[in-house]
Amino acid sequence: MDVDVARNLHEVLANLPEGVRLVAISKYHPNEYIEAAYAQGQRLFGESREQELSRKAGSLPKDIRWHFIGHLQTNKVKYVAPYISMIDAVDSMKLLREINRQAAKCGRTIDVLLELHIAEEETKYGLTLGAARELLDGGEWRELHNVRICGLMMMASNVDDEAQIAREFDTAAAFFDECKKTYFKDDDAFCERSWGMSHDYQLAIAHGSTMVRVGTSIFGPRVY
Ligand SMILES: *Cc1c(COP(=O)(O)O)cnc(C)c1O
């Protein structure tokens, strides 16, 4: 292992104020990297591909809490439903329904975040604010008793302009407040604002993040 995972992890953790949690993004990295972070006490990890995640979850300690951070196809939900701790990037009613269905089959409730599309970049994924309002206004989610919407997730534009990134985080934070007030006033579970990656997590924390998703700064560059 040519990356000092333990040192990198402690450097990142030292930058997190109380109340901000770290999801260590281990996608494309081998088990030994995860074990090195685990040995330092890290228990929250995030992966973006179902097969890779299932393989790792099956071979690594059972007290790891796994987040699925990527785009999850509905036909893959059944594979992660028995063990996933949180699905971070729900961006359709169809996916939410399928998570509910598979969670019910497993006799559990699965925590999810709604993924917002705020960045200027072209991507197929994430709900525009309008689409998110529409989903929540629809109310069907209230009947899905095996999923629990715990907050919002987003990725800022991949640009150097910090002012733009900060604006995007602020837009997400304001939308979180709107959702809290409008739909989740009496629901303490709705509390997470997941934004911030290796290059922007400190800025994200300054703009309301409660849960950063950091990969490269801990594990080094990914080899695809
Ligand atoms: C890969 C990934 C991250 C981590 O990115 P780094 O730049 O390596 O910190 C965070 N969030 C999501 C959704 C990702 O896919």
Image (tube, rainbow, N blue to C red):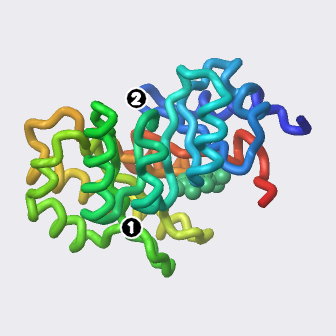
Is 176 on the left-hand or right-hand side of 38? left
* Residue occupying the point 9% across, 63% down: 137
Quadrant housing the C terminus: bottom right
Quadrant housing the N terminus: top right
Which amino acid does the dot numbered 1 rest on?
Gly
Q: Residue furthest bottom?
A: 122
Disc 2 designates what residue?
A: 19
Q: Secondary structure at mark 2?
A: loop
* Residue occupying the point 30% across, 55% down: 98
Which amino acid does the dot numbered 2 rest on?
Gly
Question: Where residue 191 appears, x then y in whole percent?
Answer: 27, 39
Split into quadrants, the picture shows ligand 1 in the one at: bottom right
* Residue occupying the point 23% across, 35% down: 189
* Residue occupying the point 68% across, 31% down: 9
Q: Which mark is residue 126?
A: 1
Is 157 on the left-hand or right-hand side of 10? left
